[in-house]
Image (tube, rainbow, N blue to C red):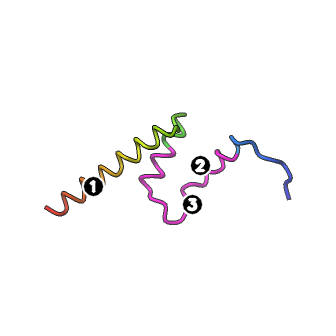
Amino acid sequence: MDDKIKSGKDVINDFFAEIYNIPNADKKTVDALVELYSQGKLSDKNVQNTLDEIVQKELKQIDKEDE
């Protein structure tokens, strides 16, 4: 057993290394979060804006399918 305590950055890096393995995670959401993280732009506001964009795109797609 490894008793080394990981830094916050190590924990976050591990999370983003494994995020695609989370069962039932929405791929578009995961892709967006990984992209923000890799760009160093993972802030509350950027996450909120990005998720809002994803929701709006999904709603538009649903509207198109209903026509």
Q: Residue at position x 49%, y 65% from top?
A: 24
Q: Earlier in the sequence, mark 3 or mark 2?
A: 2
Q: Earlier in the sequence, mark 3 or mark 1?
A: 3
Q: Nearer the viewer, mark 3 or mark 1?
A: 1
- The residues bearing labels 1 and 2 have C-alpha atoms spaced at a distance of 27 Å
> How many badges with numbers are in the image?
3
Where is residue 66? Give x, y as percent.
Answer: 17, 63
Magenta span of residues: 11-34
Q: Residue at position x 44%, y 59% from top?
A: 26
Q: Is residue 6 above or below residue 2?
A: above
Q: Quadrant of the N terminus?
A: bottom right
Q: Earlier in the sequence, mark 1 or mark 2?
A: 2
Residue, disc 1: 59
Label 3 with label 2: CB-CB less than 8 Å: no
Where is residue 7? Give x, y as percent.
Answer: 75, 42
Q: Is residue 47 left or right of residue 1?
A: left
| SS for dot 3 | helix
| SS for dot 2 | helix
Q: Is residue 42 above or below residue 28?
A: above
**What label does residue 16 carry, if any?**
2
Amino acid type, label 1: Leu
The magenta stretch spans residue 9: no
Q: Residue at position x 48%, y 42% from top?
A: 35
Amino acid type, label 2: Phe
Camera-side residue: 1 or 54?
A: 54
Label 1 with label 2: CB-CB less than 8 Å: no
